[in-house]
Amino acid sequence: MTASANAARVQTHTPDHQLTALEKFGKVPRPSLAYTEEVARETAPIYEKVKDFIPEIEWAALAPLVHAINKLKKERNAVILAHNYMTPDIFHGVADIVGDSLQLAKEAAKTEAEIIVQCGVHFMAETSKILSPEKTVLIPDMNAGCSLAESITGEDVRRLREANPGVPIITYVNTSADVKAECDICCTSSNAVQVVEAMGTDKVLLVPDQYLAANVGRQTDVEVLTWAGSCEVHEQFTAQELRDYRAIEPGVKIIAHPECPPEVVDEADFAGSTAHMINWVKDNRPEKVMMITECSMADNVANATPEVEYIRPCNLCPHMKRITLTKILDTLVDLSGEVVVDEDIAARARVSVERMINLKN
Ligand code: 13P
Ligand code: SF4
């Protein structure tokens, strides 16, 4: 038998992890997006939660997307993880799990679904992939970035380590896998003080958010060195603006995210992660509140706290706002936007993220 005849008899099998998501899970037909009576009836309970923000005429266009996404995610055995900054149609309409960065990372580590659709920004999807390497992780828009994640590279961290021997390097979760791989441990805004103190040293480096680091540094005796990164959304708030709002709205409670500059946090009644801010409103039920953060937060919590009046100066995150229902449906149909992380980088980054997740409270 000739060599070429032999070769023709050899069957090639591509290992599962080398297949594209579409090759692995197969095609599905694109669903119809008509606003039928069935769609209106089945999405009515969801509309109840968002009707203050979405006019009926707009819902006629959104409801078929919500309906199709919810059906298709079951068929695909997919879970939708959505950050608290997603718009209410996503947050209340299609998300299976909502939360802050820490909650989403924990959920990604334990989900049983084969596919994770990450409704948030790219570093969040990468974190899910790092924690669940065997799962398919999809993001509806690959260009959903973050000014903090853009501000530092793995090479920068290697240089910082050389310049600061023996000083533990903590990375905020808002960074690339490459940066996480070079650091000792990860943190989020809900556990940064705890992580800093868990290092057991007099000094730490907390990168890349200079404002988070400054806010954390004021809550601990540990010296917190940092990097010149910042969140383009939270750095825009000013202390004077907050003082002006208090003058116009006497009695208003002001709560802020710790990515805001320290002088802004000083003017606030409370500062915490997005989940901690939501819980603060639910626990304290103030008459009037201002959330010094991304705009969707107030919309998403408003329906669970009807007695609270939300005063709404806020800043939009252009990266978070890239995620839309249309793109989520496209992702589920085409299985596009697959997040891939180099295996060696992922393995090293996983050590940093798991060290954080496994910290005892
Ligand atoms: P949280 O961890 O508080 O949800 O923050 C994520 C984020 O990107 C805030 O800008
Ligand atoms: Fe990044 Fe700021 Fe947007 Fe959060 S709000 S994703 S930190 S740019």
Image (spheres, grey):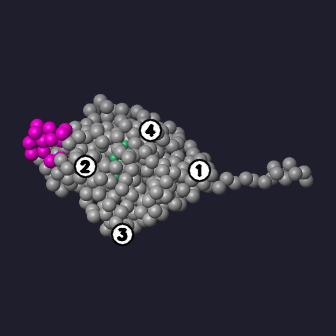
Label 1's element? Answer: helix
Q: Distance between the residues labelled 4 and 2?
A: 36 Å
Confirm whether the magenta stretch covers residue 253.
Answer: yes
Picture residue at 38% right of the left edge, 46% below the top: 229
- Write down the residue under mark 3: 200
Three-letter code for the amino acid on which mark 2 is drawn: Pro
- Write down the residue under mark 1: 24
- Which quadrant would the C terminus be assigned to in this image? bottom left
Three-letter code for the amino acid on which mark 4 is drawn: Lys
Q: How far apart are marks 3 and 2 (CA)?
A: 25 Å
Residue 327 image label: 4
- Callout 2 environment at 10 Å: few (<14), some (14 to 19), or many (20+)? many
Can residue 283 be seen here? The reply is yes
Tag 4 near tag 2, CB within 8 Å: no
Three-letter code for the amino acid on which mark 1 is drawn: Lys
Three-letter code for the amino acid on which mark 3 is drawn: Gly
Q: Distance between the residues labelled 4 and 1?
A: 21 Å
Nearer to us in this view, 54 or 175 = 175
Q: Where is residue 47 in the image (x, y as percent from the top left)?
A: 28, 41
Label 4's element? Answer: helix
Q: Position of residue 133 (x, y in %)?
A: 52, 57
Label 3's element? Answer: loop
User: Nearer the viewer's eye, disc 1 or disc 2?
Assistant: 2
Q: Position of residue 262 (x, y in %)?
A: 25, 49
Label 2's element? Answer: helix
Residue 262 image label: 2
Which circle's residue, 1 or 2, is located before the other in the chain? Answer: 1
User: Nearer the viewer's eye, disc 4 or disc 1?
Assistant: 4
